[in-house]
Image (cartoon, helix red, strand yellow):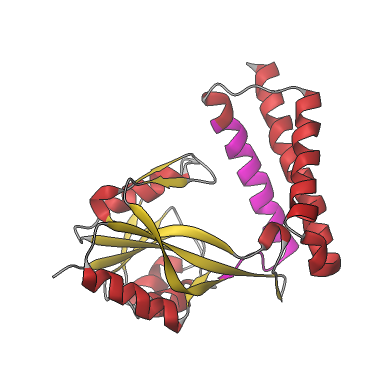
Amino acid sequence: MSSLTVLILTKNEKKHIEAVIENAKQVTKDVLIVDSGSTDGTVELAKQAGARVVYRAWDNDFSAQRNFALEQTETEWVLYLDADERLNNELVIDIKRVVSTNDNKQYSMKRKSVAFGKEFNHGVLKPDRVARLFKRTHVKWVNKVHERPECKDVLVPLKGYAEHYTYPSWEHYFQKFNQYTSIWADNAYSNGKRTSMAAAYGHAIGAFIQMAIFKGGILDGSMGLVLCCNHFSYTLTKYLKLLELQRKK
């Protein structure tokens, strides 16, 4: 009989940890937390909630954390969840069906984002699909940030959706902004990518047009437009950081 482990990466997720573990237990009893040095009581709360907890030092590499998680279990299936994601009932039922069927496929789940107390339907935070359910030995993660899975199995969408409670505050948003742009620039430079000031502005303008117009960000009202403008800044900043690395090295 096939089995499933839910894998959750954490660092200072006290606000979410108990709820995400309770939610994950709807699909399996085996919930594994890979913590990277929480100081807010996340680890203690996770253990009290019945999850297994292992530690891996944070080295600015999300893929390394996800690949490490794969080595900490021997179940046939793995499902990745972020601490701020919650499976709805329809998605829970479909995950159980997949695990019991036990075929050689990978599965994606739909996410609906809630940020700053508002649900978004367009632009930067429009509903998306992310591949998260795999045969454990069939997947490997690549890229330090905005990581993605490499899996040769046919990708199939799951029914239902997960609510994604991202960005509760602007302070949290800009912490992620700075962290992700720095990791992206370092990873891009290591992979041989180079840029120029003109290219940085070109990428940023293109990113704004993509989010505001083609993905309809302006349809989410003033907050949607703000996020599109911030996406311009985000894209410009990551390329400026890459340019800075070029000049230094």
Q: Give the vertical position of 143 relative to 109 (above or below).
A: above
On screen, residue 195 versus residue 34, left or right, reads right
Q: Nearer the viewer, residue 31 or 79?
A: 79
Magenta-colored span: 164-187
Residue at image location 70% in from the left, 17% down from the top? 247
Residue at image location 67% in from the left, 52% down from the top? 175
The image quadrant of residue 18 is bottom left
On screen, residue 211 versus residue 129, left or right, reads right
**For the C terminus, which image quadrant?**
top right
- Residue 226 appears in the rendering: yes
- Residue 134 appears in the rendering: no
Q: Main secondary structure of the magenta part?
A: helix
Residue at image location 77% in from the left, 57% down from the top? 227
Q: Nearer the viewer, residue 94 or 69?
A: 94
Picture coordinates of residue 115, whole percent (x, y): 68, 69
Picture coordinates of residue 77, whole percent (x, y): 26, 62
The image quadrant of residue 120 is bottom right
Q: Give the vertical position of 78 relative to 117 (above or below).
A: above
Residue at image location 43% in from the left, 81% down from the top? 90
